[in-house]
Structure formats: structure tokens, C-alpha cells
Image: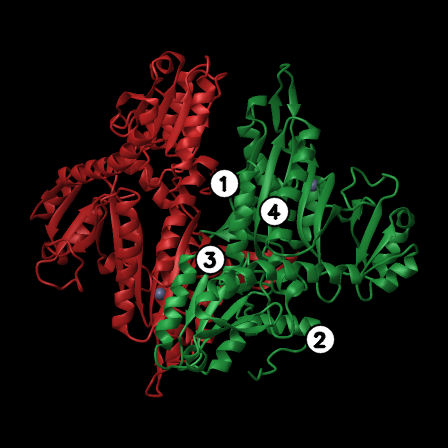
Chain colours: A green, B red
Amino acid sequence: MAKAPVLTPQAEDFPRWYQDVIAKAELADNGPVRGTMVIRPTGYALWERMQREVDDRIKAAGAQNAYFPLFIPESYLRKEAEHVEGFSPELAVVTHAGGKQLEEPVVVRPTSETIINASFSKWVQSYRDLPLRVNAWANVVRWEMRPRVFLRTTEFLWQEGHTCHATQDDARAYARQILHEVYQDFMVNVLAMPVVVGRKTAKERFAGAINTLTCEGMMRDGKALQMGTSHELGQNFAKAFDVQYLSTEGQREYVWQTSWGVSTRMVGGLIMGHGDDNGLRLPPRLAPTQVVVMVVKDGPGVGESAAKLAAELGGAGVRVELDDRTDTPFGRRAVDAELKGVPVRIEVGPRDLAEGNVTVVRRIPGTKTPTPLGGTLDAVNTALVEDQQALYDEALARREEKTADVTSVEDAIAAAATGWARIPWATLVDGGEARLAQDAITVRCLLRPDGSVPESDEEPGVVAVVGRSY
Amino acid sequence: MAKAPVLTPQAEDFPRWYQDVIAKAELADNGPVRGTMVIRPTGYALWERMQREVDDRIKAAGAQNAYFPLFIPESYLRKEAEHVEGFSPELAVVTHAGGKQLEEPVVVRPTSETIINASFSKWVQSYRDLPLRVNAWANVVRWEMRPRVFLRTTEFLWQEGHTCHATQDDARAYARQILHEVYQDFMVNVLAMPVVVGRKTAKERFAGAINTLTCEGMMRDGKALQMGTSHELGQNFAKAFDVQYLSTEGQREYVWQTSWGVSTRMVGGLIMGHGDDNGLRLPPRLAPTQVVVMVVKDGPGVGESAAKLAAELGGAGVRVELDDRTDTPFGRRAVDAELKGVPVRIEVGPRDLAEGNVTVVRRIPGTKTPTPLGGTLDAVNTALVEDQQALYDEALARREEKTADVTSVEDAIAAAATGWARIPWATLVDGGEARLAQDAITVRCLLRPDGSVPESDEEPGVVAVVGRSY
Ligand SMILES: [Zn+2]
Ligand SMILES: [Zn+2]
């Protein structure tokens, strides 16, 4: 099958390749208001699958979903000093509503710590109310000067979890539980992305947090993308909003809190982490459509065989689509399935079928294998499992290849031209982090030498992973 | 079990009963900005179940989910004259963002016809692109002067479907398909609400529609609640936004459109349609928790038996919760389960258990039945099926009882004091609808004498259902 060169090759211009994929695979458009996006059905189906997988894990971690208002009184944001400082430049403000000027302007939520803590202060009374763990799926607005679809948009979709705990230890443990059991597990096992999981430096923390933990993915151009964060908020918001509980000893105590989120930015990460010059490559466990059964051209029994095969796969629990639009050229439909990253395409045509075969085309390894009709389900199941793993292995190998172990700031800068550097954090403490910033290189996170997450920046032997980022 | 009189009785003050239930069952709070609401986990779980059921039906009807921006340029709203007139008084306007005054103010979406049609004008090119059917789950904002939680809130959650069709017939048929197969089916079979399904009068139509179809529920105080609407938009927005396609004959034609939505208002309808003086009564097919297995008090083997029973029910596909918080008085927990409307409560206590029994308490009929442990699953399955039907039958009987067949405007006004009236539409055409409006009575919808939906207001014999409404 001859492929039309529909995308700018990655090696030629990666950002343009990204824009091309988003347009040609019909994932999203720019909205009319600067920095906003329209998420088209093909793109939204990816987000829906992400939501379902993340939501299941959040519920398994004991949090319950709720919803908090979009509009926050401006005065709420000022209650926590670092927080308002961090978010003020990005706020969208409603000054006028119901045909009148508002007495107090309201802010469109950039994140909901403030308004949620106003509720928490009513809901939390006693140690019996703790831990209190809620999560909200919502849209948020942060005015973007340099928007890029899915990665940095004025409005994006996310979940934000917020919890209250009796002790700092409990809050810390929960922030880590979410990091590992919800985010890392989802990214590694569903998105097939070998994220590096670590601790942010003080400079990179969320505005108002005492500790930010992160999952960092490497994109195919060697840049980092922050894929999800989990924060310990200490008692900052608890004190600002007076969230106190009566302890078992009868004392009033401030709660200890966490907050954590992942967003539609993950869609951007999925595209840039796995896509190739032919388009998206979706990990089978995420893919909204795992298999497309495609009628190559009409012929005796072809449509029937294809429909029967699709029904068989669907009945076996495979997410399958039938494409029998033979009035559209086959080549165009095949290119479209590749662009959209469908893991397996089964071509059903008159010639193969006469010999009792179909052709199984696997998007990730790129193989095309004639397969007896009766063996197709097995072939599909094998492909879905193997290619999930293959995509992860490939991404891990690339990350390792593009990560250099260095000991000087100069070598870190050199390495960040094409990927990441691992460098002793001690090397960066005195001005090194600032020096990297001059070249738009940031510390993505801090790790222990064995790759686990340190309890503090001061642990001996802590390693910084540094790179450019989206 | 002695019940604390926690709620104002419905007969005493229905609106206050409604507020009490929402507070005591922890469904929602008022937000800090006037008219906004915080949907608490117990309330949000109801909405999540509604979403899942409605979403499945929307997908089965061939629509795909997508997402469109929250912010709409003010100029977009002005493109369709009736539309802007209908929504202007309710708009919230962002004038200031990213630290600056905006060149063009942006409106927070009150509904998305305008911004979605801007996308449609790009996506629709040929007859091959039709029908185009998208749906979005989103928050919308309509500034409310007289807010009431779930029923009329400044911000609410909903789905809005938007479609383009080649012909008016196709659009009309799809608006009806959504009305019947998505909304009516969900409301009748899941919410157990005997909604009346009909056509709005010209006065009650959506701003910009040529026809609005509606599902109207009767609340326990005899008032109506509009539970969901499906509109034919004709070519109004297509012309305003230039949504045209190339027909099979090679002509450029405007598309014919529909839009349709249901919202968190349905949560209010569920509460007021089924709740009683002890709280919510949830239809089993909707209930997030269908059964709570409650340890009455500790004793030999009690906790173990309760846990085992809960696991057995869960394994059989029942949505079950275990309540073994024996440090909280049993009476309080039982009242709470009644308040929250859990359909079945299974009380596991030492005395009953010694005889091999548990007590099955059914919220809807209010029965308490000692049941052998081994027969509990059967008893639960029977209860869930029977009580779903019982709730529907009860609501239908109430609706019939509270609906009077009348022939004069005076009698309609009298009937609307306690319920609805059915009156020949011909009686209301010349000033009757306006006369009713003086008493805050509206035509909820128009029906054929056999209860089906008329094609036009002018069909002979059309009947109007009139009443007060939320
Ligand atoms: Zn802060
Ligand atoms: Zn209009």
C-alpha cells in the first residue's frame, strides 16, 4: 500500500509533526478564544478511556467524586499568599453577570484548593471525619500566553483530588499512594509510558505545596512532559480556611492535606511519546478501538465474513470496529487507521478470503501477516498483549538511550540538547539549577540512586533528572 | 427503631422538606457565589449513575462525545437573533484575563449552539459527512435570580447533543429518537418516573428552535419539572454560521439540526418525584448503593457473617456496601440509610443470627422481613426488581390522581392548585395560555389524545397538559 506523505517527518520538525498529527487524525482544533481547544470525537475518545482508567484507580484508593463551583470569589484566592502569587497572572475574571456589574468579581477556577477548603471547613469536625478524600473531574482555566493544543491550553480538562488527614504522615503516605497506585500504575500499564517518578525541587513546586511529587514522561524528541503531580499541602490551606478537627484527645487541630491531578495534557504526552511518522500509535490497553476489520473491496461473501469476524471479536471482549465503506478508496482508509493509531487492522479481501485467509496488520511492530480466518481471534489477542509490551519496551529503551549520566552542569546542558541528564543534585544546589534555567533546562525531578522517591531534597546521594520540557 | 424527626414533613412545607433532604442526606451545599452549588459525594454519585446510563444510550443512538470551549466570543451569540435575545439576561462575561482587559469580552457558555456551529461549518463539507452527531458533557452558566439547588443553579452540569442532517425529516426523526430512546427510556426504566412526553408550545420553545420536545415529570407536590428537552433547530444556526454541505446532486445546501440536553436538574426531579418524609427513595436500577449490609451490634461471628454476605452480594453483581461502624449508634446509621434512600438494608445482629436469620428492610414498601441467611441473595434480587416497579407504579398512580380532565381555563386553574390539568389545546389558543401565565401556570406540553407526540400544534384534537412548575 502506497502511503501519502501526510505528516511532516518527526526528524524534520517535531513541533510541526505534532500539529500535523492533531489535524490529520482529527484529534482537536483551536477554539475561537485564544488558547482554547475543541476536542474532536477521536481525541475525546482517548480522554474518555483515560478518565475511566484513572477514575477506577482513584475510587480503589478510597476517594469519592464530587463537584465544586467553577466560580471562586476573588477574595478566596488571596487567602493563601503563595497560591495567589502563583496563579494571579493566569486568571480569567468575570466582572459582569446577569446584566449587571458584580459587586465582587469572580475568578474562573485555575485550580480549586481555595473553594474546596471552604467546604472542608464545614465538613470536617472530628477525627471521625478523617481521612476525607474527594476528587472532582472538571474544566479549569489558566490564561496561556504560548498555548499549544493539549499541552498548554487556556482551558483544559482534568481531575483534581483533595484530601484531609489527621497527621502529616498520613497525608504524605496518601500523596505517595496516589502517585504510585493511580498515576504511575496507569501511565506504565495503560499508557505504556516509562515515566520517571520523583520529587520536585522547591523551585518547581506547586504554589502552596510543601512537597510536589511528579511523573515525568520523555517525548520522542527527548523533551520531558510533566504528566501528573501529587502534592503535600501541609497545613497551608487548612490554616488559611480554618479546617480543623477535634482530635481523640479533644484538641482542635489543623488537618494535613494533599492535592493531585492529571489532565488532557496526557493526550499530548501519548501522542508525542509513541507517535511516529505515520501517525499515532495507541497502546492496546488504552485504544478506544483496538481492532478495525476493514473490507478491502467488495466480493462474494467478503462483507459477511468481515461482519462476522468483527462480531466474533466484539463478543470476545475486543473493542472492535467494522469498516465496510468500500465507496472510499481502501488506501485512504488504511492511512487513516494508521494515522489514528489503531493497534490492529484486519484486511478482509476477496483474494485472501478465497484461500480462507485475512491479513493481520499490526501498527506497532508494522508487520503484515496472512492469517487463517479461524485463527484471527488468537492472533489479535497475541498482538494486543505483545504490542502493549513492545511499545513500553521501545519507549524505555529510547529513554535510557537519550539519558546521559553526567557530573557537571556543562555536560548536563550538552545532554539536554537531545535528551535528559542524570546529575548529582549536590552539583546543582549552589546556582546550578539557575544556570540550567538560563538554557531553558529544568530539574524534572529528584530521585534516589536506586530510582525510588526521596523523602527530602537533602538525602545524601540524591540524583537530579534534568532536561528541556513542554 | 425510633426515628428522629429530621425532616420537615412534605405536607407541612414541601420546599423546606426539599432543602432539608438535600442538607441531611448530604447531597449538596450552596456555593459561595450566588446560585452556585457544591455537589457532595452522595449527590454526585447519583449524577454519575445518571451520566453512565444516559451516555450508554446516547452512544447507542450513534452520537460521539466531544468537548467544546467554555468561552464563547460575545459576537458569536449575536449571530442568531432569537438566541441572543433569549440568553442575554443570563450571561456571565469575562472582561479581564491574563492580567489585561480583553479586546473582545468572552461569554461563559450558557449553551453551545453557537460555538459548536462554528466547528460544524469547518467539519461539514459533503453529504458523506452527514449525519454528524456529537454530544458534550459540560458545565454551563446561566445567571439565576431565584436559584434553587439542582433545579435552577447559576452553574449546572449537563450533556448537550448537537447534530446536522441532510434533510428536515432526518433531523425531526433524530430529535424524536433521542427523546424516546435516550431520555424517556432512561427516565421511565431507570429513574422510575412516568414522564409525560410531548411538544412545547411556541411560547415555551428553546430560543432558536423551531420545535422543542420535552419530558415532564410530576413532583410529589403536584408541580411539573421539565426533565429533558430535544429540539429541532431547523436551519437557523446553519444559516447564522454557514453550515453547508455539497449534496449528491452537487448543490450547496444548509444542514438541518437538532440539539438536546439533560442536566443535574434531574437529581432534583429524582428527589422530589420519589422522596418521602423519611428522605430519598432511590429506584434500585439507579441507586449507587443498592444494598447496605449493616452490623447492628458486635457479637460472635456477626462482623464475619455481614462481610461474607456483602461479598456474596457484590459477587452476584449487586452494588453493595458494608456498614460495620458499630461505634456509631445503629439507629443513627439506619436513619442515615433511609435518608439517603438506599433501596435495601440488611440488618445483621447477634440475636437474629443465632437463629440463622438476618432482617431485610425494604425502603420503598417499608417492609421488614426476617430472612434465612442462605435466602438473602434471592430476597435482595426480588426486592430490587419489585421495588423498581413499585416506585414507578406509585408515581404513575399519583400522577393520574393529580391530573384532572377539564374543558375550561377556570377549571384548569383550579386543578393546577394541586396538580395538572388536561385541556383541549384549542381552548387555550386565543389568550388562554396568557391567562394561565397570570397565575404562573404554563402549558407543559401538547399531546395527542392517545398520549403520543403530535407533529404540529395544529393537529386536531391536541391536548395541553398544564400546571405549575419548578
Ligand atoms: Zn498557596
Ligand atoms: Zn436562536
Above or below for B40 versus A335: above
Q: Is residue A300 left or right of residue B70?
A: left
Residue A468, by quadrant, is bottom right
Ligand 1 neighbours mark 2 (CB distance < 8 Å): no
Q: Are marks 2 and 1 on the same chain?
A: yes
Mark 3: secondary structure:
loop
Which chain is home to disc 4?
Answer: A
Give the residue at mark 2.
A13
Above or below for A244 versus B432: above
Contact, CB < 8 Å: mark 2 with mark 1?
no
At label 1, which amino acid type do we have? Answer: Ala
Q: Quadrant of the C terminus of chain A?
A: bottom right
At label 2, which amino acid type do we have? Answer: Asp
Point out the frontmost of discs 1 and 4. 1
Give the residue at mark 3.
B109
Q: CA distance from mark 1 to mark 4?
A: 15 Å
Q: Which label sits on residue A111?
A: 4
Q: CA distance from mark 3 to mark 2?
A: 36 Å
Q: CA distance from mark 3 to mark 4?
A: 19 Å
Point out the frontmost of discs 4 and 2. 2
